[in-house]
Image: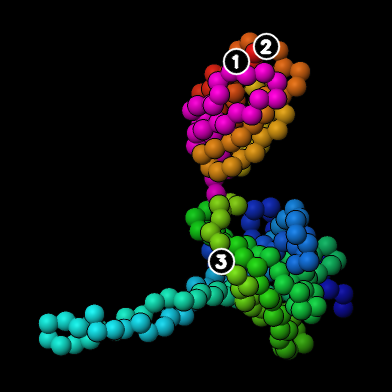
Amino acid sequence: MPAPVLTPPTTGISKTASRWRMSVDTAYNPAASTWTPTWVEVYGISNLSPGTVDYSTVDDTDYDGVDGSGLVWASNVKVGASWKLSGTHTTKVYGGARDPGAAFLEDQSDANVAVHVRWFDRQGVKAYEGYGDVAWTGSGGAATDLSSATFEVTGKGPRTTITNPVAVASVPDATSASPTTGPVGTPVTITGTNFVGVTSVKFGATNAGLFDVVSDTQIKATVPVGIATGSQPIKVTNAAGDDSSLVAFTVT
């Protein structure tokens, strides 16, 4: 009989049977030096284990550790670290095709190509990303069972803490600019908070010619071409809304 065609869950809701969700960057190519990530969520996961960082140590105990009773207390130093991410995937059909995220993991495993993944708490707290080798192993079962597979991503390099993709955004708050005056083309450093995820920087009603979110507290922007001279206060915007406390700037 034909396989049922299922509809993917509502955007932002995972079928993950835990608090954790996982996405894979389908644009990642280990041979490329630069690329723009394309994050695709992996649906149908259960038993997703975010894992922990395991450290390897060496014994550096010496006689400096002798206490008053003559005991030598052991001492170890961390010299290496590694991480793993694992889970179980139940294969379902979405729109007549394999789940795109799971299919990508399986294909990269078959091709022995590294993957770029991120995993995050659905409550909007913890979130990590990293690069690693993926091992995808299909499982057997009865004729009436949905096919499933186990997977494991073994890290190649560090597990990095990132801003949680499902965290509720806070309205940005720009507090100062340096310099506070300048002609078209002037680079301006804007200081404040909640800048990660900023989508727009304006001088008055004119979009900044260029802007770069350096960190959660700093943006570098350029006074745009075609803007009128005079007072053009800076406004910063993200998905949560506009900064209500405009920063004074004068175009000369």
Q: Amino acid at mark 3?
A: Arg
User: Residue 159 got which mark?
Assistant: 3
Locate residue 236, reporting x and y percent. 60, 30
Q: Are marks 3 and 2 in contact (CB under 8 Å)?
A: no
- The disc, 3 or 1, on the residue closer to the chain's N-terminal end is 3
Q: Which residues are magenta?
A: 167-196
Q: Are marks 2 and 1 in contact (CB under 8 Å)?
A: yes
Q: Which residue is mark 1?
A: 250
Task: Tell me the tag on residue 229.
Answer: 2
Q: Is residue 64 left or right of residue 42?
A: left
Q: Which mark is residue 217?
A: none
187 falls in the magenta region: yes
The residue at 66%/25% (across/down) is 186
Residue most extreme to the left: 68
State left or right for residue 121 relative to residue 142: left
Mark toward the start of the polypeptide (3 vs 2):
3
Q: Amino acid at mark 1?
A: Thr
The label nearer to you, 3 versus 2, is 2
Q: Position of residue 90 (x, y in %)?
A: 70, 75
Q: How far apart are the alpha carbons under marks 3 and 2?
A: 48 Å
How far, Cα to Cα, is label 3 from label 1? 44 Å
Q: Position of residue 230 (x, y in %)?
A: 63, 10
Q: What residue type is disc 2 on?
A: Thr
For mark 1, give the secondary structure: strand
- Judge depth for marks 3 and 1 and give the one in front: 1
Work out how far the residue at label 2 is from the one at label 1, CA to CA, in angstroms: 7 Å
Q: Locate residue 15 relative to residue 75 in the image: left or right.
A: right
Can residue 22 be seen in the rendering of this structure? Answer: no
Q: Quadrant of residue 74?
A: bottom left
